Image: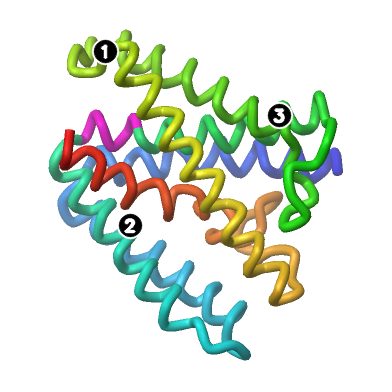
Amino acid sequence: MKNETIQRILSSIILIPIALFFIIKGSFFFIFFLSICLFITSFEWYKMTKINNYFLFGFSFLIFSFLSAFLFRNISLNDFILLILICVSSDVGGFVFGKIFKGPKLTKISPNKTYSGMIGSFFLSIISALLYTNYYGLTFWTDNLLLITVILISSVSQIGDLTVSYFKRISKIKNTGKIIPGHGGLLDRIDGMLFAIPFAFILFKFL
């Protein structure tokens, strides 16, 4: 377990700057990045669901999610980065708080998820979002609006995590792949984002 945690940290240190580079560069670079991610996650989803009849449903959702990411990033880079920050912080907060405080399990779908982890997800995502918006002076985000938005996005991200965990459970696999040391597959790493991005994009359009 200790080795897995170290691998997760090292993988994140390497992958986060790479992802930020493509996000910030935009244009062809971001399209290329999204295309690679779509190909990998689609392949992992296919391997997981090839013996079932819901591959096309999931594949259609993947396309919708990555298209939302492309459109959202082109509308507002700062808000898109804020969204990614919320998702990453939610994931990290859940992992760290869950490991430290443990406690009652959240659901049988994913035995590693705990109530302390859920609280940690909300806590770290709120703190990260406040620091980001204050540092860059994003005056559109009042404290109340930001708080509500972060809680909603973090909730959807956690639901996305549990949804993919459910499909992994019925497919009787632990991870969707082995491409990222300590994390498993790319789908394991960005499962929450795949749900949070289209949700946030729709929310942002209304706001």
Say which residue appears at 78% left-offset and 55% top-offset: 108
Task: Please determine whether, in this image, residue 101 is positioned above or below residue 156.
Answer: above
Determine the residue positioned at 41% across, 28% down.
150
187 relative to 36 in the view: left or right:
right
Q: Earlier in the sequence, mark 1 or mark 2?
A: 2
Q: Quadrant of residue 123?
A: top right
Q: Nearer the viewer, residue 152 or 47?
A: 152
- Judge the density around disc 3: few (<14), some (14-19), many (≥20) Cα neighbours within 10 Å: some
Judged left or right of residue 110, residue 35 is left
- The residue pinned by badge 2 equals 33
Instruction: Say how the picture is coloured.
Output: rainbow
Q: Amino acid at mark 3?
A: Val
Q: Which residue is mark 3?
A: 96
Q: Secondary structure at mark 2?
A: helix
SS at circle 1: loop
Q: Nearer the viewer, residue 89 or 15?
A: 89
Name the mark nearer the viewer: 1 or 2.
1
Kindly indicate whether the residue at mark 3 contacts the one at mark 2 (C-beta within 8 angstroms).
no
Q: Which residue is mark 1?
A: 142
Q: Residue at x 47, y 69 (%)?
A: 40
Residue 186, how many percent across, how many down? Answer: 54, 59
Q: CA distance from mark 2 to mark 3?
A: 28 Å
Which quadrant of the figure has residue 42? bottom left
Disc number lying in front (3 or 1):
1
Which residues make up the magenta segment? Answer: 77-82
Query: Which element carries disc 3, helix, strand or loop?
Result: helix
Tell whether 95 sits left or right of 128.
right
Q: Amino acid at mark 2?
A: Phe
Residue 44 screen position, x and y as percent: 55, 73
Q: Nearer the viewer, mark 2 or mark 3?
A: 3
